[in-house]
Image (cartoon, rainbow, N blue to C red):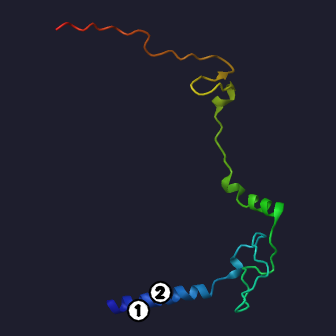
Amino acid sequence: MNNSLGVCSVVAAILFGVSFAFANPSMLPNHAGYPMDKAVDPVHGQSLANDPGQRNAVGDQALHKAAVTDVDHVKQSLSINRQDERILEKPGAGMLPKVEGPVIKIEPPVKEATEVIPEPK
C-alpha cells in the first residue's frame, strides 16, 4: 500500500512539473498593457515579456482599454421599483418624500395611553 501510494505521488509530481513545460504561451492575453516591450535578460538573452513585440500603452489609449475590459462584469443593473416613479422630491432622512398622487399619512398606532396610578404602600 505504501509503495503504490509513493509511486502514485512521484508520478503525479512529475506530471505536474511537466505540465509547466508544455504550457501554451499563445493562451496568454494579448493587449496593449504590457510595458516590457523588447526587454531581454542580460545574462541569458531571453525575452522578459510574454509578447516581446508589443508596445507599451500610454495615456488615453491605456485608460480606455483598461476601462472597457470588464464593463459587463462591473456594470450595476438594479431592478425597477414602480413605487419610485411617483417620487417628486426626497427631503432627507427621517422625512417622507413628496410624491405625485394621493398623499398617504401614517398615523401613530397609539393616540392615547391609559394612566396607571400606583397604589400607596
Kindly indicate the quadrant of the structure image that contains residue 100.
top right
Where is residue 95? Give x, y as percent.
Answer: 59, 23
- Quick one: quadrant of the C terminus? top left
Badge 1 element? helix
Where is residue 19? Give x, y as percent.
Answer: 58, 85
Q: Is residue 59 above or below residue 8?
A: above
Kindly indicate the quadrant of the structure image that contains residue 50.
bottom right
**Label pair 2/1, CB-CB below 8 angstroms:** no
Q: CA distance from mark 2 to mark 1?
A: 9 Å
Residue under the point 45% across and 16% down: 109
Name the residue carrying label 1. 7
Residue under the point 65% across and 24% down: 91
Residue under the point 69% across and 29% down: 85
Where is residue 14? Give x, y as percent.
Answer: 50, 90
Callout 1: few (<14), some (14-19), or many (20+) C-alpha neighbours within 10 Å?
few
Residue under the point 67% across and 18% down: 101
Q: Amino acid at mark 2?
A: Ala
Left or right: residue 63 versus residue 100 is right
How many marks the image carries: the answer is 2
Where is residue 3? Give x, y as percent.
Answer: 35, 93
Left or right: residue 10 versus residue 62 is left
Name the residue carrying label 2. 12
